[in-house]
Amino acid sequence: KKYLKMTTEQVCNPPPPPSLPPPPQNWSKSVGFTKRTEVPIGDYISKHWNRLTNDDDSMHVVSTFCTLNPVIQNGPQCGIVALSMATQLLKASVTVDRICQEAQILKFTAKGEMFSVENMKVLAETVLGTCDAQVLHSSSSAPGQIIMHLLQGKPLLVPYDSDHNFEPCMRNGQSAHWAVLHGFCLVVPEETVRLVHLENDQCHKRLHHLTPGVHEESVVLQLLNDSKNVFVYAHQGKSSHYALWSLDDLLVSNSN
């Protein structure tokens, strides 16, 4: 019933951390960045257009998306891999091996598993130094908090139940997994798009893009209030491709 919001603080750089012992042999080079081969975001949205809009020709899609390099997990490291991907959006790119070492020193893990959102908060702040991580609870205000945070180009880490295709499901925590969120799509009526004066995508006339850190919060709140569906872009450690999930489905999975 919790997820983790991450930002960076504007503070002086901390002193360098002490040297760490070498990672266990089975962790060494266990994961790495994979080369991005994603289709352009406009083409990706077009491919899923009917699912996003429920085949409603009057709907428009407003998207914001932060690119990151996927990291593939090896073993039960889904939370640590998600954190490693999240650090890219905070201009740090901390490796999985480094995070695993810190988690072991803190006695949070044996083989890379992370079962506690509170422990993940401490781990994120430890490995990043200038990170301000907040544990948030699923509630009626959660969608707004998530969207406004992603609008800033900052990541969120979310534990959820994973289906066979790694999408959110409900299994009472029996298939627990972690994902990092790095963008969103809002499905809104045409009149709302006209009201807030959004430009069209060059190739897709009913697709519009928000730039993280540029568009005003009031504009996004108007879009969110009028939205018919809300989706989030997510990466998780068992696929090199991003996914587009219903935010409602993800929060239900997080809460079960």
Image (cartoon, rainbow, N blue to C red):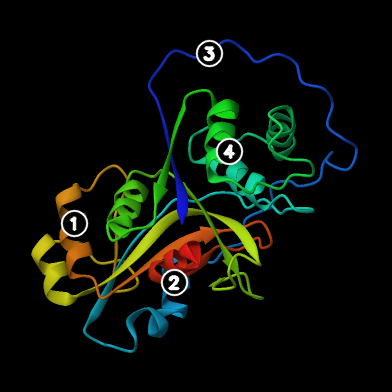
Q: Amino acid at mark 3?
A: Pro
Q: CA distance from mark 3 to mark 1?
A: 36 Å
In the picture as drawn, the residue positioned furthest to the right comes out as 25
Front residue of 98 and 207: 98
Does 243 sit left or right of 162 as displayed? left
Q: Which residue is mark 4?
A: 119
> What numbered label is drawn on residue 221?
1
Q: Amino acid at mark 4?
A: Asn
Q: Residue at (52%, 37%) from the top-left corner?
A: 121
Looking at the picture, how far across and down is residue 148, in whole percent? 29, 50
Q: Nearer the viewer, mark 2 or mark 3?
A: 2
Instruction: Return the disc, 1 or 4, that comes first in the chain's sequence.
Output: 4
Q: CA distance from mark 4 to mark 3?
A: 21 Å
Q: CA distance from mark 1 to mark 4?
A: 32 Å
> What numbered label is drawn on residue 14?
3
Q: Secondary structure at mark 2?
A: helix
Q: Nearer the viewer, mark 2 or mark 4?
A: 4
Up-down: is 91 above or below 114? Answer: above
Q: Which residue is mark 2?
A: 249
Q: Residue at (44%, 50%) from the top-left corner?
A: 66
10 Å neighbourhood of mark 2: few (<14), some, or many (≥20)?
A: some
Q: Secondary structure at mark 1?
A: helix
Q: Nearer the viewer, mark 4 or mark 3?
A: 4
When asked about the image quadrant of residue 238, the answer is bottom right
Q: Amino acid at mark 2?
A: Asp
Instruction: Return the disc, 2 or 1, that comes first in the chain's sequence.
Output: 1
Instruction: Return the disc, 3 or 1, that comes first in the chain's sequence.
Output: 3
Q: Amino acid at mark 1?
A: Leu
Instruction: Return the disc, 2 or 3, that comes first in the chain's sequence.
Output: 3
Instruction: Return the disc, 2 or 4, that comes first in the chain's sequence.
Output: 4
